Structures are given as structure tokens and as C-alpha cells.
């Protein structure tokens, strides 16, 4: 793992965007794995700026999102489809057919998960996967205890995860209890992984992911086994890191 410590959230977001921009300029047909939640919002805003002000071209880029809430239609205000189109896709020149997000309302869930895995395979695999991290060390919606061998699957969300995401819903009762997520094995097949975290409330999870034992009880710890991971955090999230460079 490479550990990069930015001074603050804005610097972290700019550095993350620059990594992605460099990849796209080098490989215009890059396949990106993308995350949702509050952590990557600054990254997406900076990618939009790079496109609108500096001409960063997304016309040949393909994207795959990590996850979606089970039971939410694409147009639901809290769906990850809506999140991605509102914050990124509608503001850049990406082809709609090049955007892939798991369906939260597929009639046949097993077939949907298999279809998603096949789409990633046909795209040639993911060049760069962006990840956030949950307070309990989850990546995607792979909660503690998820097998490292897991592929795209339906997963039950913990109360902690639902509580953390409740701010995006009118009430806790409206927060879905399940989601569809890339599995850990799927994530680990990306050629490069970029893990982002900011704020002191993520320090314990980052410390466990980087320096703790590799365990399914801390899903992000599996990243220690990946050959090319960048952990990019602000100073608050780096509080429990013993080694940073």
C-alpha cells in the first residue's frame, strides 16, 4: 500500500481527481470503478471542473459503480443512480450506455448479479477502482463477515451502516435494509485501487485497514493483499496510521 496524507478534504479530492485524469489522458478508454456517499463528492466536483475548464474527455470512458440500494428504483431521490447522474454523469461527456450501476429492482437478482459480473469482464476489467470505507471497515456494501471470495451479491446492511446513511433519507425507517454490491473478489480484480477517507470518524477504520490483521471482520483489510493500492486520506483520517508517506 501507498499511503498519501493530504492536508484537508479539498486537497485529498484534488489529488484523487488528478490520479483519475492522468489515467484517462494516458488511456482514453479507461474503465473506472466508482463509489458513492459523501466522501467522493469533492472528487466528482473536481472531475467536472477538469472536464468543463480543462477539456478532460470522458467520451470513451466506461464506468461501473460499486453498489445500489435494493428496492430503490433508478429515479428514487436517494438511489445511487440518481446520485451519480446528479453529481457527475450529467455534467461530463460520458456516453449513457457506458455507465453501469447495479439494478436495485431487478426481477431476478441472481441473474442481475451475474449480468453485472459479465459486463465488467466484457469491458476488460476495471483499471482503477475508487473506494470509500465504512466506520466498520466495509468497502462497497460488503459488511464485516463477508467472504473475501464474494462476487456481486445481495447483502444485508448493518444497523451502523443504515444509521450512517440515514442522513440521505427522510427517516431511519426509509433507509433500505439491503443492497446489491460488487463482491470483495470483484473489487480485488481491479488493476489499481484508490481508497479515500476523510475525517476523524474514519481514523479507526483506516488504521485497521492499513495496519491491522487481514480479516473478514474488517473487509478493507483485504486491500493489504492487492499489488497496487493508494490510500489517500486527510490528516484527521490519518490519526491512527503509524506510517505515512
Image (tube, grey):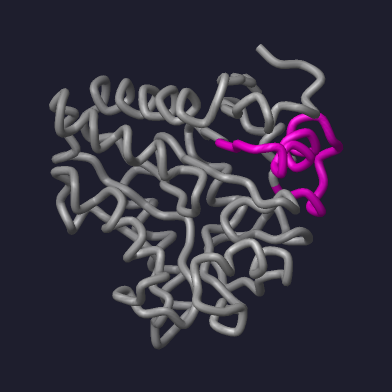
- Residue 2, how many percent across, how many down? 62, 19
Q: Which residues are magenta?
A: 196-219
Judging depth in this view, the residue of 124 and 33 nearest the camera is 33
- Residue 49, how many percent across, how many down? 23, 32
Quick one: which residue is furthest to the right in this view? 213
Within the image, what quadrant is residue 209 found in? top right
Q: Quadrant of the C terminus?
A: top right
Image label count: 0
Relative to 59, does residue 71 appear above or below in the rendering? Answer: below
Q: Is residue 116 left or right of residue 6?
A: left
Relative to 225, does residue 41 appear above or below in the rendering? Answer: below
Q: Is residue 146 left or right of residue 130?
A: right
Q: Residue at x 73, y 58 (%)?
A: 147
- Residue 44, how many percent across, how many down? 35, 41
- Is residue 216 one of those drawn in magenta? yes
- Residue 39, how many percent across, how many down? 51, 44
Relative to 144, does residue 39 appear above or below in the rendering? Answer: above
Within the image, what quadrant is residue 222 found in? top right
- Is residue 233 one of those drawn in magenta? no
Q: Residue at x 57, y 26 (%)?
A: 230
Q: Residue at x 37, y 52 (%)?
A: 64
Q: Quadrant of the N terminus?
A: top right
Q: Residue at x 49, y 50 (%)?
A: 38
Quick one: which residue is furthest to the top in this view? 245
Judging depth in this view, the residue of 98 and 72 nearest the camera is 72
Amino acid at each position: 500500500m501507498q499511503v498519501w496524507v493530504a492536508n484537508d478534504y479539498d486537497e485529498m479530492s484534488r489529488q484523487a481527481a488528478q490520479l483519475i485524469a492522468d489515467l484517462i489522458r494516458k488511456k482514453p478508454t479507461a474503465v473506472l470503478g466508482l463509489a458513492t456517499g459523501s466522501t467522493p463528492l469533492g472528487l466528482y466536483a473536481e472531475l467536472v471542473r477538469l472536464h468543463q475548464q480543462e477539456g478532460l474527455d470522458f467520451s470513451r470512458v466506461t464506468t461501473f459503480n460499486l453498489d445500489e440500494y435494493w428496492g430503490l428504483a433508478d429515479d428514487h431521490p436517494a438511489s445511487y443512480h440518481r446520485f451519480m447522474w446528479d453529481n457527475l454523469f450529467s455534467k461530463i461527456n460520458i456516453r449513457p450506455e457506458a455507465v453501469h450501476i447495479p439494478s436495485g429492482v431487478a426481477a431476478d437478482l441472481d441473474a442481475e448479479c451475474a449480468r453485472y459480473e459479465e459486463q465488467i469482464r466484457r469491458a476488460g476489467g476495471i483499471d482503477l477502482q475508487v473506494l470509500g470505507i465504512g466506520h466498520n471497515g466495509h468497502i462497497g456494501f460488503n459488511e464485516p463477515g463477508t467472504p473475501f471470495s464474494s462476487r456481486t451479491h445481495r447483502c444485508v446492511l448493518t444497523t451502523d451502516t443504515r444509521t450512517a446513511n440515514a442522513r440521505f433519507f427522510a427517516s431511519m425507517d426509509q433507509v433500505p435494509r439491503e443492497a446489491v454490491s460488487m463482491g470483495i473478489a470483484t473489487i480485488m480484480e481491479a488493476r489499481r485501487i484508490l481508497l479515500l477517507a476523510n475525517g476523524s470518524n474514519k481514523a479507526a477504520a483506516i488504521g485497521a485497514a492499513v495496519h491491522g490483521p487481514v480479516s473478514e471482520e474488517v473487509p478493507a483489510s483485504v486491500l493489504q493483499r492487492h499489488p497496487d493500492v493508494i490510500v489517500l486520506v486527510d490528516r484527521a483520517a490519518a490519526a491512527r496510521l503509524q506510517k505515512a508517506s
